[in-house]
Image (tube, helix red, strand yellow):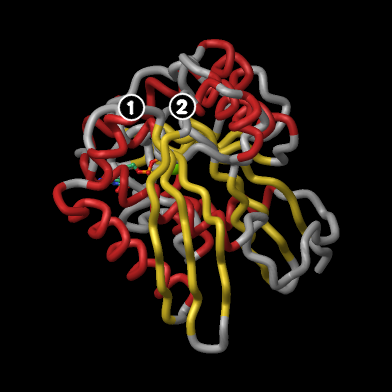
């Protein structure tokens, strides 16, 4: 059989389950997942390899109207995902009526490449609602193929994957067959720490945080990590650290546990908190953190 390969890019509103689906396809926790919107800030590749295929999935940030420069960079990642896709996976969740950006929606409507509309979270729905939702999306996107799924419960995920394989063009692999992602180890450290911050802090705090790993030293039996948690303002620093350092300690303990699983090795983490004033609106800082800025 001829070899198939291509880019399969997942786009959609915030919080609909894009990262959950990408991890389900890849079988690894490449993308962090939380119940808060705008968890994902980057375009993250997850590569699924077989003898005669290579599916290069892209997880992307949820589509929003940008309010500050970081969010503009996030939307640039989404734009790039429109440009190189061989198959577009447009994910919506049960109950959702429209994409948060009309221009992006028009791009989906006018797409020349195949669009699979994935109606996610059907575990939270019943048959009647599901049918009404399918009709709603079929009317809006007559050319799209609709697949009801539950990324969380792995329902219909394999069927969608098989359909993707059918749609992929014949092509040689783009990446080495043992490669799982385009991101370096430090990226996953940063993301894991940021996930704990999204989980444990309220309101604006998680959105004001960026994590930078300054040291990643791997020995035979242990990885030693030193990371900086950057906040925008002095008051946020105290909140991150918490009473006698307890809040920060919890972030470190939970991140370490996850990273030990991810790297399959003992991990030691040191965390610091620094104020980096208004980094979200500073193009130079954004570039440094891997946003196009
Ligand atoms: N019930 C249910 N919950 C789901 C399903 N898929 C994802 N979720 C939950 O929805 C929330 C958001 O999931 P994510 O995968 O982070 O969503 P996302 O689209 O990547 O979100 P952003 O990165 O913020 O755009 C999490 O709490 C998930 O556990 C599903 O099939 N069913
Ligand atoms: Mg995500």
Image disc number at residue 133 = 1
Characterize the local packing of mark 1: few (<14), some (14-19) or many (20 or more) Cα atoms within 10 angstroms. Answer: many
Q: Is residue 52 above or below residue 221?
A: above
Between discs 2 and 1, the one toward the N terminus:
1
Q: Residue at x 21, y 54 (%)?
A: 245
Q: Is mark 1 within 8 Å of ligand 1?
A: no
Say which residue label 2 marks. 277
Res. 110 in view: yes
Q: Residue at x 33, y 53 (%)?
A: 152
* Residue 124 pos. (x, y %): 21, 42
Q: Disc 2 to disc 1, how far (Cα)?
A: 44 Å
Q: Nearer the viewer, mark 2 or mark 1?
A: 2
Quadrant of the rendering where the C terminus is positioned: top right
Res. 147 in view: no
The quadrant in which residue 235 appears is top left
Characterize the local packing of mark 2: few (<14), some (14-19) or many (20 or more) Cα atoms within 10 angstroms. Answer: some
* Residue 88 pos. (x, y %): 61, 36
Q: In the current view of this chain or complex, which residue is farthest to the bottom?
A: 220
Q: Check disc 2 and report its element: helix, strand or loop.
A: loop
Q: Nearer the viewer, residue 237 or 261?
A: 237
Q: Is residue 171 above or below residue 266?
A: above
Quadrant of the rendering where the N terminus is positioned: bottom right
Q: Residue at x 21, y 38 (%)?
A: 125
């Amino acid at each position: 059989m001829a070899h198939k390969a291509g880019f399969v890019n997942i786009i959609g509103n915030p919080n609909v389950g894009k990262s959950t689906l990408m991890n389900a396809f890849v079988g690894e926790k490449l993308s962090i997942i939380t119940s808060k919107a705008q968890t994902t800030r980057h375009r993250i590749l997850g590569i699924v390899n077989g003898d005669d295929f290579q599916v290069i999935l892209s997880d992307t940030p949820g589509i929003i109207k940008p309010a500050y420069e970081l969010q503009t960079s996030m939307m640039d990642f989404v734009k790039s995902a429109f440009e190189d896709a061989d198959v577009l996976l447009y994910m919506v969740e049960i109950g959702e009526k429209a994409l948060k950006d009309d221009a992006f929606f028009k791009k989906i409507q006018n797409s020349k490449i195949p669009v699979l509309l994935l109606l996610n979270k059907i575990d939270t729905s019943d048959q009647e609602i599901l049918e009404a939702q399918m009709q709603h999306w079929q009317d809006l996107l007559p050319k799209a193929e609709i697949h009801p799924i539950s990324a969380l419960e792995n329902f219909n995920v394999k069927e969608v994957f098989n359909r993707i394989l059918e749609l992929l063009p014949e092509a040689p692999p783009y990446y080495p067959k043992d490669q799982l992602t385009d991101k370096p180890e430090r990226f996953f450290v940063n993301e894991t720490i940021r996930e704990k911050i999204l989980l444990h802090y309220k309101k604006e705090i998680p959105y004001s945080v960026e994590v930078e790993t300054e040291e990643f030293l791997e020995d035979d039996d242990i990885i030693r990590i030193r990371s900086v948690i950057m906040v925008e303002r002095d008051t946020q620093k105290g909140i991150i650290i918490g009473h006698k350092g307890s809040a920060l300690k919890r972030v470190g303990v939970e991140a370490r546990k996850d990273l030990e699983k991810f790297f399959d090795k003992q991990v030691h983490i040191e965390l610091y908190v620094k104020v980096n004033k208004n980094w979200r609106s500073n193009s130079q800082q954004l570039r440094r953190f891997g946003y196009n800025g």
